[in-house]
Image (cartoon, rainbow, N blue to C red):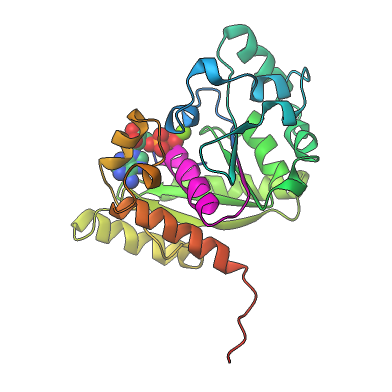
């Protein structure tokens, strides 16, 4: 969940869709009050019956806010914090760090992966998400990140570990909007490797206009154009993530 416009929502949606295509039961939660995940999954406001706003006002359980998607293995909780009153209540209730963790208790056993798309802040809903999670994934925009911002995020994760979730760990850093063979990419990748090599995912997500285009059509890019390099990259990222934990295969 680093700063805005780095590809967090795109990564959350497309990684969730890729895990679902790999038949891993996945829940995507849009925890950004300005959330745009619904658009990328083709949800118009009329199709949203409940969302994170009800969960954070305790009017409905999380189950009630879960929507099926066009992928059998992917469910979705939209962000519907869309009025000033809801936003005020949401912000206030999110000061309590354990609301999301408690809400997820029942749902957790039904899913292999729960992905929470966060806004670029370091409090409230993000503290909730980090308290409820086992790990954090950080998309960084290739060529446009600040090492200082990444280091600040690491410190915030450390802080949440200390006060609320000792088991939390860093799943990894994913480079997004990657343009190969450019000087700025080369320099920035070198910098990132120098400081954070052990956290870097091998898969890079290339820059491709298909990402924005598919959002207009209300589809994750893998369902819009599976042959695009960016779709392949998200499938590969899912594969990399799944295989991090796969038991060693017996050599026959
Ligand atoms: P964040 O959630 O971090 O604010 P988004 O995922 O919403 O970032 O992406 C910000 C903008 O960049 C969006 O317009 C999105 O369509 C675009 N974008 C994201 N990833 C890519 C990519 N790999 N190639 C091209 N455009 C991208
Ligand atoms: Mg976003």
Q: Quadrant of residue 184?
A: bottom left
What is the x, y in percent for residue 9? 46, 37
Residue at 67%, 53% in the rendered image: 112
Task: Report the residue that reaches farthest toward the bottom.
Answer: 252
Quarter of the rendered structure image containing ligand 1 = top left
What is the x, y in percent for residue 39? 44, 27
Residue at 77%, 33% in the rendered image: 103
Q: Would residue 185 be found to the left or right of residue 240 on screen?
A: left
Dominant SS in magenta: helix
Residue stretch in magenta: 7-27
- Whether 65 is drawn above or below 240: the answer is above
Q: Would residue 190 be found to the left or right of residue 88 on screen?
A: left
| Closer-to-camera residue (55/226) | 226
Residue at 39%, 44% in the rendered image: 223
- Whether 202 is drawn above or below 36: the answer is below
Q: Quadrant of residue 4?
A: top left
Task: Report the residue that reaches farthest toward the left.
Answer: 182
Q: Is residue 5 visible?
A: no
Q: Is residue 182 visible?
A: yes
| Closer-to-camera residue (20/212) | 20
- Whether 99 is drawn above or below 233: the answer is above
Q: Quadrant of the C terminus?
A: bottom right
Q: Magenta stretch: residue 9 in it?
A: yes
Count of numbered marks:
0
| Closer-to-camera residue (105/167) | 105
What is the x, y in percent for residue 228? 28, 51
| Closer-to-camera residue (243/122) | 243
Residue at 72%, 50% in the rendered image: 161
What is the x, y in percent for residue 75? 60, 38
Q: Magenta stretch: residue 194 in it?
A: no
């Amino acid at each position: 969940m680093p700063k805005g416009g780095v590809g967090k929502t795109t990564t959350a949606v497309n990684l969730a869709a890729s895990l679902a295509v790999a038949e891993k039961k996945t829940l995507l939660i849009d925890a950004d009050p300005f959330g745009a995940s619904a658009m990328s999954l083709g949800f118009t406001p009329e199709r949203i019956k409940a969302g994170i706003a009800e969960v954070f006002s305790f009017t409905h359980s999380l189950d009630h806010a879960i929507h099926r998607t066009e992928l059998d293995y992917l469910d979705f909780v939209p962000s519907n914090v869309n009025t000033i009153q809801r936003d005020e209540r949401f912000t206030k209730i999110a000061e309590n760090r354990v609301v999301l963790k408690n809400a997820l208790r029942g749902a957790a056993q039904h899913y292999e992966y729960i992905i929470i798309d966060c806004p670029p802040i370091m409090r409230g809903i993000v503290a909730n998400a980090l308290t409820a999670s086992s790990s954090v994934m950080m998309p960084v925009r290739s060529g446009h990140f600040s090492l200082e911002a990444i280091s600040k995020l690491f410190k915030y994760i450390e802080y949440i570990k200390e006060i609320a979730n000792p088991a939390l760990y860093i799943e990894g850093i994913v480079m997004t909007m990657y343009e190969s063979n450019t000087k700025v990419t080369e320099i920035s990748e070198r910098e990132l490797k120098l400081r954070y090599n052990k956290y870097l995912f091998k898969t890079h997500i290339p820059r491709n206009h298909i990402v924005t285009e598919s959002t207009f059509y209300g589809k994750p890019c893998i369902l819009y154009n599976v042959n695009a390099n960016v779709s392949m990259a998200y499938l590969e990222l899912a594969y990399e993530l799944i295989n991090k934990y796969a038991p060693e295969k017996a050599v026959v």
